[in-house]
Image (cartoon, grey):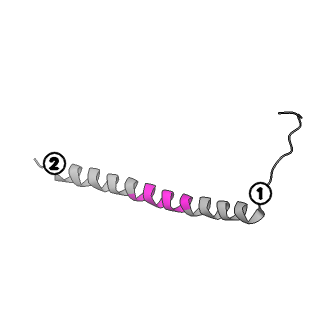
């Protein structure tokens, strides 16, 4: 009785999950950098204080 198929399946599933997470993080990082660049190009937006004396 060998446990090799179970071990290989477990390692394979773990590898797929890790690869999926890495792809997701890289894609999200690119999206966030693009959004940040768009905000920086738009310039500063500041709200005026509605209360005086603070």
- State which quadrant residue 22 falls in: bottom left
- State which quadrant residue 52 falls in: top right
Foreground: disc 1 or disc 2: 1
Task: State how far apart marks 1 and 2 are (Cα).
Answer: 61 Å
Q: How far across and how far down the image is residue 41, in percent?
A: 73, 66
Foreground of the two, 35 or 45? 45
Q: Earlier in the sequence, mark 1 or mark 2?
A: 2
Q: How far across and how far down the image is residue 26, in percent?
A: 50, 61
Residue 6 in magenta? no
Q: Which disc number belongs to residue 44?
A: 1
Q: How far across and how far down the image is residue 43, in percent?
A: 77, 61
Image point (49%, 57%), residue name: 25
Q: Specify the segment rendered in magenta.
A: 19-29
Q: How far across and how far down the image is residue 47, in percent?
A: 83, 46
Foreground of the two, 3 or 22? 22
Kindly indicate whether the residue at mark 2 contacts the one at mark 1 (C-beta within 8 angstroms). Answer: no
């Amino acid at each position: 009785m060998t446990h090799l198929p179970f071990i290989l399946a477990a390692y394979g599933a773990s590898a797929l999950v890790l690869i999926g997470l890495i792809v997701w993080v890289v894609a999200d990082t690119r999206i966030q950098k693009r959004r940040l660049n768009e905000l920086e190009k738009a310039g500063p937006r500041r709200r005026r204080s509605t209360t005086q004396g603070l």
